[in-house]
Image (spheres, rainbow, N blue to C red):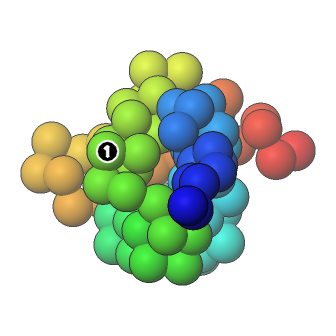
């Protein structure tokens, strides 16, 4: 019988921090924009996270004031609090 181990991003705080690491890895384009696919693709396919973990992590990062999601949903921006995480 095979047992499944704990998922590393089941905790929304851990998922939010990992999303912040992915967002930091990319150079923002015009006006500090980071296109959402630049953080969701590495998280979902590279880290093998689930869509629910991604959604919970993104929501937590926004709740904590680390990221600001544009109303179109196509890009995020770092807030000052988000930038301070890596200072």
> In terms of depth relative to the viewer, which is nearer, 31 or 68?
68
Q: Position of residue 24 (x, y in %)?
A: 66, 62
In this rendering, the count of numbered labels is 1
Q: Position of residue 34 (x, y in %)?
A: 43, 65
> In terms of depth relative to the viewer, which is nearer, 20 or 68?
20
Judge from the rendering whether residue 58 lies leftward or rightward of residue 26; answer left or right.
Answer: left
Name, please, the residue furthest toward the right: 87
Judge from the rendering whether residue 78 lies leftward or rightward of residue 86; answer left or right.
Answer: left
* Image quarter of residue 16: top right
Residue located at (63% from left, 45% from top) = 6
Note whether residue 82 is visible: yes
Residue located at (31% from left, 45% from top) = 52
* Image quarter of residue 51: bottom left
> In terms of depth relative to the viewer, which is nearer, 83 or 56?
56
Residue located at (87% from left, 44% from top) = 87
Q: Position of residue 67 (x, y in %)?
A: 48, 39
Helix, strand, or loop for circle 1? helix
Q: Which residue is mark 1?
A: 52
Image vertical order of residue 80 relative to residue 28, above or below: above
Name, please, the residue furthest toward the front: 1
Q: Position of residue 63 (x, y in %)?
A: 44, 21
Name, please, the residue furthest toward the left: 72
Task: Determine crowd level at label 1: few under 14, some 14-19, many 20+ residues with C-alpha closer than 10 A.
Answer: few
Image vertical order of residue 15 relative to residue 35, above or below: above
């Amino acid at each position: 019988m095979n047992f499944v181990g704990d998922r590393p991003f089941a905790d929304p705080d851990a998922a939010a921090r990992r999303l912040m690491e992915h967002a930091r890895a990319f150079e923002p384009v015009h006006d500090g924009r980071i296109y959402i696919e630049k953080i969701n693709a590495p998280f979902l396919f590279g880290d093998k996270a689930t869509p629910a973990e991604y959604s919970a992590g993104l929501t937590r990062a926004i709740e904590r004031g680390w990221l600001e999601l544009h109303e179109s949903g196509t890009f995020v921006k770092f807030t000052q609090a988000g930038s301070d995480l890596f200072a």
